[in-house]
Amino acid sequence: MKHLTKFAVAASLLCAAPAAAQTQTAFPASVESSIQSVLPRMIAWRRDFHEHPELSYEEVRTARVVAQHLRSLRMEVRTNVAQTGVVGVLRGARPGPVIALRADMDALPVTEEVDLPFASRVRATYNGQNVGVMHACGHDTHVAVLMAAAQVLAGRRNELAGTVIFVFQPSEEGAPPGGLGGARRMIAEDLFGDLEPEAIFGLHAWPIRSGAVSIASGPTMAGSDRLRITVHGSQTHGAQPHRGVDPIVVSSQIVNALQTIPSRQMDAVRSPVIVTIGSIHGGVRYNIIPDSVQMEGTIRYLNPETRDELYARIRRTAEEIAASAGARADISIEPNAIPVVNPAESTARARAALVRALGEENVLTDQPNMVAEDFAYFQQELPGVFFFYGVNAPGVETADAAPNHSPRFFVHEPAMETALRAMLAVALDRVAPSP
């Protein structure tokens, strides 16, 4: 079964049991009480955001809801950071370290196919096309979880030894052409001000079992760059291809040849890479060979040292195949995100906090993923730890769950309690008063 049935969706929504077994003993009774108190609001926030998704740098409504909540908690709040970002600062009553917690807010140009009472019906314009909009990557849960964590921590500000910065970031799903993505733009706009965090933490919904988190030291997620190739041929009648140069045939050859770069030209162990073409456009009529074809795709890599070599091989492949047919290929590669690398010391400390909160059996170690996250740019500025939390409904294996970015991506809502506990665990590990 590749996606949940209507019955399974309904059963998941009605399931009242938290994803994490109630054997947690890491939190004081007052924190535990606050967690239980905020859970209904967290789910309500998530459903609201899911029903009203917004694309990158259009997160106006989401940002307004977040800012109102943070202000209600008597935080210092900055809005319009990186256009639609929100930053809240919670200062504890006692001196201590400064840390940051981050959630991304943007949705994707995906038309939802999950039968939910709060399913998205939103449509918008993306790249000149009318598209559906969906939180197909779980960012709605990230925002709701961080809002809930803010409420729990703000309720204990008189006991906190330190300062917590809540970062609600726009535009994680990719920078606009020629612009900066949300993380880089927030950094460029000095989101931390005079504060100097010693660590930043982020999490992501992921199709593993509910109740579990996954964390790994070292390279965790890939670097991601946007690839654009325009093949210029010569327009002619479809019945007389010899009178022109067919960019569609050339583009087909380039797409196939690009796949030999990861499989035959790069070291599969030292430099695993992926080259994917996700969009091809050319021509307007069935019997006319067009002048040009435009292709867009993504490049993924784990080893930053091999990126330049990868770029060079992509350019050579496209340009020389085009030239062999009398065409011309223009190649543009635009950086989007660098690899997420969790520092060993900070990761070990975070893992220990997660084990105390969730139990050893619920803290998994995973291999690196070729998906990307611009959280990596925060890691360039300060030690940062990124981890995943499981969102599969009970009985759904990872292989059977719809992946992130799918129109059938589904979050088992009780799993969000695990995410909340995880965020609180890594935060309180830094700013809870010493016994």
Image (cartoon, rainbow, N blue to C red):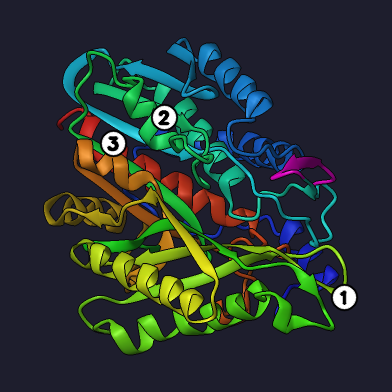
Q: Which residue is mark 2?
A: 167
Tell me where residue 372 appears, x and y as whole percent.
42, 57
The reply, left or right, for residue 76 in relation to residue 10 is left
Give above or below for 433 relative to 382. Answer: above
The reply, left or right, for residue 189 in relation to residue 349 is right
Q: Which mark is residue 134?
A: none
Earlier along the polypeptide chain: callout 1 or callout 3?
Answer: 1
Q: Which residue is mark 3?
A: 428
Query: Label 2 neighbourhood size at 10 Å, few (<14), some (14-19), many (20+)?
Result: many
Question: Which range of residues does the magenta coloring cover?
Answer: 120-128
Provide the secondary structure element on which disc 2 rests. strand
Name the residue nearer the viewer: 239 or 411: 239
Tell me where residue 173 appears, x and y as whole percent.
53, 47
Name which residue lies at 66% across and 66% down.
Answer: 280
Q: CA distance from mark 2 to mark 3?
A: 17 Å
Residue lying at the far front in this picture: please name it: 243
Marks 2 and 3 close (CB-CB < 8 Å): no
Query: Label 1 neighbourhood size at 10 Å, few (<14), some (14-19), many (20+)?
Result: few
Q: Which mark is residue 287?
A: 1
Provide the secondary structure element on which disc 3 rests. helix
Tell me where residue 207 appears, x and y as whole percent.
54, 68
Provide the secondary structure element on which disc 1 rests. loop
Earlier along the polypeptide chain: callout 2 or callout 3?
Answer: 2
Name which residue lies at 37% across and 22% down.
Answer: 156
Give above or below for 236 relative to 333. Answer: below
Amino acid type shown at disc 2: Val
Q: Assess whether residue 126 is covered by the magenta stretch.
A: yes
